Amino acid sequence: MRVVIDACVLFPTVMREVVMAVAAQGLFEPKWSERILEEWARAAAKLGPEGEMQARGEVALLKARFPKAIVPPHAGLEARLWLPDPADIHVLAAAVSSSADAILTSNAMDFPKNILAEEGLERLDPDAFLLSLHEAHPAKVRTAARGVLDEAIRLSGEDWTFRSLMKKARLPRLGKALERG
């Protein structure tokens, strides 16, 4: 399954790390455009100059880790596409250009399912998507999430559980499923 990942999934950190760890397990093929990555860096800039610098470093690492994920949009494609928020058309263009199956986004209002269906795409919510992957491939998703949990504990010094960390990352259903085993 080929999935375009919206900037709102790449930033915040824990959500991105879980999604990308699951992709590294081979459960889906991530895609994005340079513009999506730039949106992520600009969003991180709201945390201050160090936030943007860190995001740009993480963008470079992500590009190196998934070199085939970058999708150049087809010339003129954006002009024929429509979404309620014109600022999101570039995400739809990346999905169409990459022959993606879906767009992974937390922004349901700006990606109506009927409009995406016209392009052969579906909209996926991060929590629901990861939960469905967990149901189909529990060991792989648990391994991916365990690595993120261990790193969060190491970096923060806090005693995170799957449930508490995933809830903070806006992945509560995944957290419950992981906690159950």
Image (cartoon, rainbow, N blue to C red):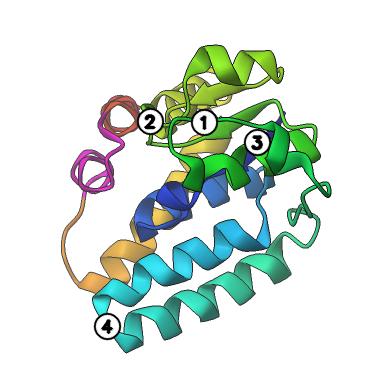
Q: Residue 83 carries which label?
A: 1
Could you give the CA–CA distance between mark 1 and mark 3, rounded to whole angstroms? 18 Å
Q: Which residue is drawn at 38% across and 60% down?
A: 13
The residue where tag 4 is placed is 48
Q: Give the range drawn in magenta.
A: 161-172
Mark before the other along the chain sequence, 3 or 2: 3
Could you give the CA–CA distance between mark 3 and mark 4, rounded to whole angstroms? 30 Å
Foreground of the two, 29 or 162? 29
Q: What x and y, as percent, mark residue 159?
A: 16, 59
Residue 170: in magenta span? yes
The residue where tag 2 is placed is 127
Element carrying mark 2: helix
Could you give the CA–CA distance between mark 4 and mark 1, rounded to whole angstroms? 30 Å
To which quarter of the image does residue 167 belong?
top left
Q: What x and y, as percent, mark residue 146?
A: 42, 49
Could you give the CA–CA distance between mark 2 and mark 4, rounded to whole angstroms? 28 Å
